[in-house]
Amino acid sequence: MARDTLKALARRIGARMKKRNLKLATAESCTGGWIAQAVTSVSGSSEWFDRGFVTYSNEAKKELLGVRERTLSRHGAVSRETAKEMAAGALARSRAQVSIAVTGVAGPAGGTRAKPVGTVCFAWSRKRGTMESVTRHFRGGRERVRRQSVVFALRGLLERLEEAG
């Protein structure tokens, strides 16, 4: 994916967020702040981007986003359940009305039979609205998995904003 694809997605998201007077918060693990970087590359994004949380460790997920120990021990850091709690935590700990959360195994190490390298869980949430979560399996090396995750997260947000009218 070309860099301008991320910027184009971010611009389209920004236009929709601004039109609806919404703010975005991100909660990222395997993407390490790349989603926040992509959206803040757009001039004027301070009007619609509130903050980003990079919570790579389980401790950070618990301390900064309120992910429950029980969720982490029962489902693992790479799970739809954890992604949902990250998205909810980002909303609860920000001034945003919309959030994106991403947690996964970018590789090359860390994969298991149940959660191989390339397994990434996403959640999108709206205050007083819907929460959606999906798991995807991406192919490629670490950089490729991370980039595909950022693009998928942004496209997912854009789709949800367009559905909302």
Image (cartoon, grey):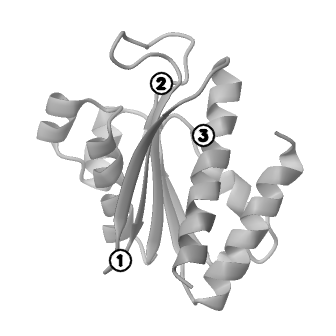
The residue pinned by badge 2 equals 105
According to the image, label 3 marks what residue?
149
Image location (x, y in percent) of residue 106: 55, 24
Q: Where is residue 134 shown, x and y percent of the image?
A: 41, 46
Q: Count neighbours of disc 3 (C-alpha within 10 A) and say few if under 14, some if 14 to 19, many if 20 or more.
A: many
Q: Identify which residue is drawn at 43% across, 78% down.
A: 95
Q: In which quarter of the image is the C terminus?
A: bottom right
**On the picture, is 100 further left or further right than 21?**
left
Sooner in the amino-acid sequence: mark 1 or mark 3: 1
The mark nearer the N terminus, 1 or 2, is 2
- Determine the CA span between mark 1 and mark 2: 28 Å
Tell me what residue is drawn at x 69 percent, y 26 percent. Answer: 143
Whether 125 is drawn above or below 63: the answer is below
Image position of 121 with respect to 130: above or below: above
What residue did someone put label 1 on?
Answer: 127
Q: Distance between the residues labelled 3 and 2?
A: 11 Å
Quadrant showing the N terminus: top right
Q: In this view, does 72 lie to the left or right of 30?
A: left
Q: Residue at x 21, y 32 (%)?
A: 75
